[in-house]
Amino acid sequence: MSSEGKQYYFLAGLPRSGNTLLSAILNQNPQIFSSPLSPVVSMLWNHDNLNTQIETVTRLENKEPVVNVGKNIITNYYQNIDKPIIIDREKAWATTANLNILKKYITPTPKIIFTIRPILEILASWINILPEQSFVDIEMQNSDWFYKDYLSLNDNRCDYLMQSHGQIDKILFSINEVLKLENKGMFCLVKYNDLINTPQDTMDKIYNFLELPNHKHDFNKIKKLEKDNDEALGHPSNLHDIRPQLKKISKDPKEILSEYIVSKYSNIGYDLL
């Protein structure tokens, strides 16, 4: 989408799949602003709900002016960003509902970069970063989650993270949209291991997808521009930290996860992830 001299693209993906890392790399390009985790989709939903929540809007025969306000949300949000290319980052952009509202208010043919990673690697990454009393543990205690005493703490954590309609499951469901013929050409899947092992080739692939000139990146001087206040949400302070040098240091998930977890989740999304 192009508006007022700016081009808008989108960055979605699974948690712990290199989304923050990729955003930091993209921000090395002086033409690009890749956002922190963005509230734009929430703003669009709040606006869309006006049609049912506000009496004066419900009465309107012509709702085009209301729709036009929604269409200007993203341009207003980024009006102070002096870059021609905006990449709005929301990990759940590709869920069916969010994709539909993106098409309604921003562009019917979005281009979405979608980061992916094998599920076992994602779970191992979570387990590595969670402190002794983590937000996951607190959520388990304060919800209707049935804690299984016959499993270890980390097994319970993994099952909780993988629960139906949970954070990982919701974004895994996005893959349905990736595979639909009607969305052909709208998604660029970026594998975490490709980003780590063949970074420039992966970035060239992204630029080709966005129809932008290639940019030579420095994978030894990666810097995250934004500071995430993850502690305010009860998350680890280093949840979105990245290393300045691109390299894979994570262990084999089988060294971290139990046989129970490896057996249970090893085949989820196997062909795609």
Image (cartoon, helix red, strand yellow):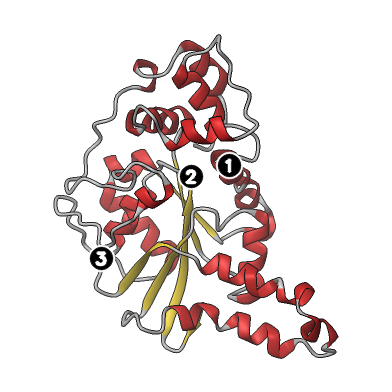
Q: Which residue was labeled with disc 3?
A: 215
Asked if 252 appears above or below 220 in the picture, the reply is above
Q: Which residue was labeled with disc 2?
A: 14
Q: Quadrant of residue 88?
A: bottom left
Name the secondary structure under disc 2. Answer: loop
Frontmost residue, 269 versus 244? 244
Q: Residues within 10 Å of mark 2 (few under 14, many from 20)?
A: many
Q: Residue 75: x percent and y percent? A: 48, 82
Residue at the top extreme of this rendering: 150
What amino acid is labelled 3 in the image? His
Which circle, 1 or 3, is nearer the viewer? Answer: 1
Name the secondary structure under disc 1. Answer: helix
What amino acid is labelled 2 in the image? Leu
Q: How crowded is mark 3: few (under 14 residues within 10 Å), some or many (20 or more)?
A: some
Asked if 47 appears above or below 245 in the picture, the reply is below
The CA span between labels 1 and 3 is 30 Å
User: Can the viewer see residue 110 in this picture?
Assistant: no
The CA span between labels 3 and 2 is 25 Å
> N-terminal of the two: label 3 or label 2?
2
Q: Which residue was labeled with disc 1?
A: 172
- Position of 57 with respect to 159 (left or right) is right
- Residue at 45% x, 27% y: name it: 120
Frontmost residue, 232 versus 34? 232
What amino acid is labelled 1 in the image? Leu
